[in-house]
Image (spheres, rainbow, N blue to C red):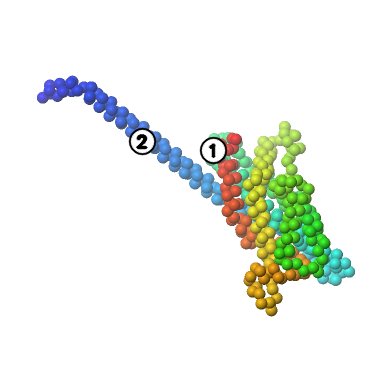
C-alpha cells in the first residue's frame, strides 16, 4: 500500500510540485491582497477622519467669523455716527436758527452719506473678516495637524493678534477715506436737488445708483473696482518694513506674509463678485426699508401692498432725509438685522469662505 502510494507520487511529482507552488502563490497573493486592502481601508479611514476634522474646524471657524462680525458692528456704527453726526444738526434745527436752509443742506448730505457708508462698510467688514479668519483658520488647522514634531507653528498667537488687528484700518483711516469719497459723491448728485422737490422711490433709487457709480468707478482711485474698494479695507503694503527686512523678527515676517496673502485675495476676481453681491443686497435692503414710508394716501384706491402703487407716491426731499438718516441703525445692527443675517448666511459668501479655507489648510498648497 505504501509502496504503491510512493510510486504514484514519484510518477506525478511534477504535478504535486506545481500544485504546491500554485497553492503557495495563491496563499501569498491572498496575504498581499489582504494587506493592501487593509492599507487602503486605513488610508480611506484616515482621509475620512481628516476631511471630517477639517470640516468640523471650518464650521467652527465660520461661527467665530459670525460672532466677530456681530461684535464689531457696534464699533463700526458708532464710528460712522461720530464722523457723520446728524444729531447735532437736528438739535440745531429745533432752535429755529436763521441759517435753517444751510443746516438742512448739511443734514441732507450727512444723512445719505452715513447710510450709504453703512452699507459699504458693513459689507466690507463681513467679507474681509471671512477672508482673514479663514486664512488664519487654515494655518491653525495645519498647526494642529502636522506641526507636532517640534517645528515652529505657522501662526503663533502674537502673529494672529498682529494680523487680525489690521481690521482696525477699516474701522479707522479706511472708514474716513470712504466717508470722504461717498460724501463728495452725495454732494455732487443730491446737492442740486431742492429740499422742496418731491421724489418717488424710483427716483431715489436712480440717485443711489449714480452715487454708487461715482464711488466705485470715478473717484480717482483707478479703474479696478476691487483695487479701489480694497484700499478702504487694508492699508498700503508695508514698504518701509520690507526695506528693513534685516531688522524684522520672524513673527514680523510671518505677519507681513499673511497681510500680503490677504491683499492677493482682495484682488481676486471672485472676491470682487462676492463683494458686489453683498453690496447689491445691501442697497436693496436700504431701498426696501425706505419703501415702507412711501405709502399711498389712505383715501387712494390703489392697494398699499402693490409695488406699482409706490411708483405714484412722491415725498419732498426734506421728508426723505430723516428716513435715510435713521437707516444706519438697521443696517449696522448687531441684533442681527435681516440684512446682516442675510450677509452671514448667503451661499456665495459661504462657498467663497470654504475656498479660502481649503487653499490655506492643505500642506501642498502652502508649499506652493
Q: Quadrant of residue 286?
A: bottom right
How much space separates mark 1 and mark 2, taking CA atoms?
A: 29 Å
Residue at image location 42% in from the left, 38% down from the top: 40
Residue at position x 85%, y 71% in the image: 96
Residue 81 visible? The answer is no
Quick check: 56 left or right of 122? left
The residue nearer to you, when weighing 53 against 108, is 108
Residue beneath disc 2? 34
Residue at the disc numbered 1: 146
Of labels 1 and 2, earlier in sequence is 2
| The N terminus, quarter of image | top left
Q: Is residue 5 left or right of residue 142?
A: left
The residue tagged with tag 1: helix, strand or loop?
Answer: helix
Say few, some or many: other residues with alpha carbon within 10 Å of mark 2 (under 14 / 14 to 19 / 20 or more): few
Residue sitting farthest toward the bottom: 299
> Residue at the spot x=77%, y=69% of the render?
198
State the residue lying farthest toward the left.
1
Amino acid at each position: 500500500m505504501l509502496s504503491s502510494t510512493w510510486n504514484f507520487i514519484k510518477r506525478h511529482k511534477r504535478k504535486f510540485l506545481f500544485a504546491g507552488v500554485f497553492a503557495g502563490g495563491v496563499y501569498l497573493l491572498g496575504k498581499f491582497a489582504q494587506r493592501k486592502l487593509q492599507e487602503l481601508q486605513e488610508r480611506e479611514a484616515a482621509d475620512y477622519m481628516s476631511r471630517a476634522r477639517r470640516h468640523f474646524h471650518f464650521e467652527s471657524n465660520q461661527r467665530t467669523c459670525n460672532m466677530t462680525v456681530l461684535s464689531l458692528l457696534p464699533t463700526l456704527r458708532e464710528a460712522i455716527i461720530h464722523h457723520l453726526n446728524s444729531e447735532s444738526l437736528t438739535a440745531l434745527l429745533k432752535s429755529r436758527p436763521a441759517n435753517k436752509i444751510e443746516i438742512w443742506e448739511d443734514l441732507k448730505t450727512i444723512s445719505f452719506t452715513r447710510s450709504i457708508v453703512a452699507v459699504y462698510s458693513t459689507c466690507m467688514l463681513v467679507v474681509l473678516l471671512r477672508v482673514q479668519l479663514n486664512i488664519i483658520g487654515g494655518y491653525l488647522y495645519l498647526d494642529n495637524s502636522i506641526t507636532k514634531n517640534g517645528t515652529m507653528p505657522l501662526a503663533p498667537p502674537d502673529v494672529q493678534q498682529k494680523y487680525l488687528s489690521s481690521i482696525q484700518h477699516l474701522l479707522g483711516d479706511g472708514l474716513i477715506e470712504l466717508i470722504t469719497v461717498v460724501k463728495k459723491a452725495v454732494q455732487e448728485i443730491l446737492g442740486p436737488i431742492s429740499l422742496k422737490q418731491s421724489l418717488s422711490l424710483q427716483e431715489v433709487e436712480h440717485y443711489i445708483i449714480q452715487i454708487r457709480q461715482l464711488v466705485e468707478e470715478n473717484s480717482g482711485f483707478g479703474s479696478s473696482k476691487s483695487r479701489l474698494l480694497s484700499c478702504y479695507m487694508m492699508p498700503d503694503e508695508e514698504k518701509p518694513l520690507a526695506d528693513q527686512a534685516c531688522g524684522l523678527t520672524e513673527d514680523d515676517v510671518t505677519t507681513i506674509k499673511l497681510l500680503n496673502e490677504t491683499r492677493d485675495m482682495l484682488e481676486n476676481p471672485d472676491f470682487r463678485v462676492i463683494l458686489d453681491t453683498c453690496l447689491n443686497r445691501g442697497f436693496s435692503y436700504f431701498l426696501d426699508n425706505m419703501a415702507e414710508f412711501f405709502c399711498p394716501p389712505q383715501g387712494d384706491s390703489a392697494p398699499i401692498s402693490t409695488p406699482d402703487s409706490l411708483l405714484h407716491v412722491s415725498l419732498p426731499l426734506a421728508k426723505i432725509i430723516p428716513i435715510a438718516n435713521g437707516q444706519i441703525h438697521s443696517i449696522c445692527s448687531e441684533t442681527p438685522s435681516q440684512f446682516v443675517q442675510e450677509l452671514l448666511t448667503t451661499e456665495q459668501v459661504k462657498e467663497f469662505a470654504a475656498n479660502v479655507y481649503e487653499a490655506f489648510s492643505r500642506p501642498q498648497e502652502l508649499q506652493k
